[in-house]
Each structure stands twice: as C-alpha cells, then as structure tokens.
Image (tube, rainbow, N blue to C red):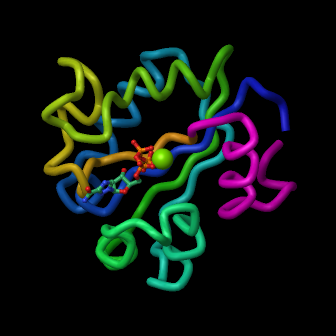
C-alpha cells in the first residue's frame, strides 16, 4: 500500500452518540480522501486480534470488551503524510491532554472511550486496513 494512506476507525462511544457524521466532516475538511469505509461490529476475539500489540497491558481485557460493545466505522484514508497528519488531527490518547479542536478533544468521553483510532505507522496502517478491507476494496 502507498505510504500516503492511514487507517482509522470511529469507536463505539462516538458511533452510538451519533457523532459519525460530524467526525467524518472534520476528517474531510482536513484534506483526507476516504478510500474505503464500512459500519461493522467486532467480536471480543476480533478486537483482541486488532489490539494484540497491547495484550500485556493492564487495560487489554477492558479495551477488547469496550471495542466490541457496539458499532464501529473503519476507514482507509488518503492524504500526503497521512499517518502523522491524522494523529495530529485526532489528538492525544487521553482527551484531557488532547489539543483544542482535535477530534478526541471534541468527542472523546475518556482515555478508553476516546472516539477514534489512528494508525501509528505506515506499516501498521497497511496491516490494519487489510484487517477490515479486502485488496479489491482498497482501490
Ligand atoms: P489508538 O491505537 O486507538 O489510535 O490509540 P493510541 O495510539 O492513542 O493509544 P494506544 O496506546 O495505542 O492505546 C490503544 C487504545 O487503548 C485504550 N487505552 N486505554 N485505560 C487506559 O489507560 C487506556 N490506555 C489506552 C484507548 O482506547 C486507546 O486508544
Ligand atoms: Mg495506538
């Protein structure tokens, strides 16, 4: 996959609060093009696979329960410098530390229910995009 792509998902707290449209609007206004998008739900097992990198962390079980608690909206996005620029757009993991105007500052409820995910590297963006979308869907 080209390095001008990143992967995101709008998390269950933001989808259930009806913030999907407002978040997508901010993403598009920031210059990201939506390459692929769907609404789906993870089982606890699939959430565990997605966040396997955190399996030794104290919050892992809680994270898997939370991430499988409702609908999510995964997306592949395209823009120059996508991974870094998107992490800036979403803000810090803890919404109390997220800069004003960032998506987590505006929409996150807590450090766990923090509205949105953003890949942390080009390599992970490609892996995470392929977790949800077939190659054909990543046109
Ligand atoms: P993400 O992967 O979802 O974009 O978030 P991130 O890079 O900002 O944060 P990361 O360290 O990768 O953590 C993944 C997700 O786990 C939840 N978390 N809970 N209870 C806690 O202390 C805690 N810390 C992290 C959050 O949902 C975080 O986004
Ligand atoms: Mg992360």
In this view, the residue in front, 93 or 80, is 93
Q: What x and y, as percent, mark residue 100?
A: 18, 18
Q: In the visual, does 1 lie left or right of 66?
A: right
Q: In the visual, does 103 lie left or right of 125?
A: left
Magenta stretch, main secondary structure class:
helix
Which residue is painted at 57% across and 69% down in the image? 52
Q: Is residue 138 magenta?
A: yes
In this view, the residue in front, 81 or 54, is 54
Q: What x and y, as percent, mark residue 127?
A: 74, 53
Q: What x and y, as percent, mark residue 3?
A: 78, 27
Q: Is residue 64 magenta?
A: no
How many numbered marks appear? 0
Which residue is painted at 19% across and 37% down in the image? 95
Q: Is residue 130 above or below residue 81?
A: below
Q: Over which residues does the magenta segment extend? A: 120-139
Q: What x and y, as percent, mark residue 58?
A: 32, 69
**Which quadrant would the C terminus be assigned to in this image?**
top right
**Which quadrant would the N terminus be assigned to in this image?**
top right
Q: In the visual, does 30 lie left or right of 76?
A: left
Q: In the visual, does 75 lie left or right of 39?
A: right
Which residue is painted at 46% across and 28% down in the image? 87
In this view, the residue in front, 46 or 133, is 46
Which residue is painted at 47% across and 51% down in the image? 9
Q: Is residue 94 above or below residue 129?
A: above
Q: Is residue 68 above or below residue 89?
A: below
Q: Is residue 66 above or below residue 22?
A: below
């Amino acid at each position: 996959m080209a390095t001008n792509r990143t992967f995101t998902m709008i998390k269950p707290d933001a989808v259930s609060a009806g913030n999907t449209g407002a978040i997508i609007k901010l993403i598009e206004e920031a210059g990201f093009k939506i390459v692929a998008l769907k609404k789906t739900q993870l089982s606890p097992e699939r959430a565990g696979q997605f966040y396997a990198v955190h399996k030794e962390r104290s919050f892992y079980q809680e994270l898997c329960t939370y991430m499988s608690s409702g609908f999510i909206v995964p997306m592949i996005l395209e823009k120059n410098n996508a991974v870094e620029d998107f992490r800036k757009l979403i803000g810090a993991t803890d919404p109390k530390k997220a800069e004003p105007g960032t998506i987590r500052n505006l929409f996150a409820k807590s450090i766990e229910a923090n509205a949105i995910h953003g890949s942390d590297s080009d390599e992970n963006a490609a892996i995470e995009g392929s977790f949800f979308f077939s190659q054909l869907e990543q046109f």
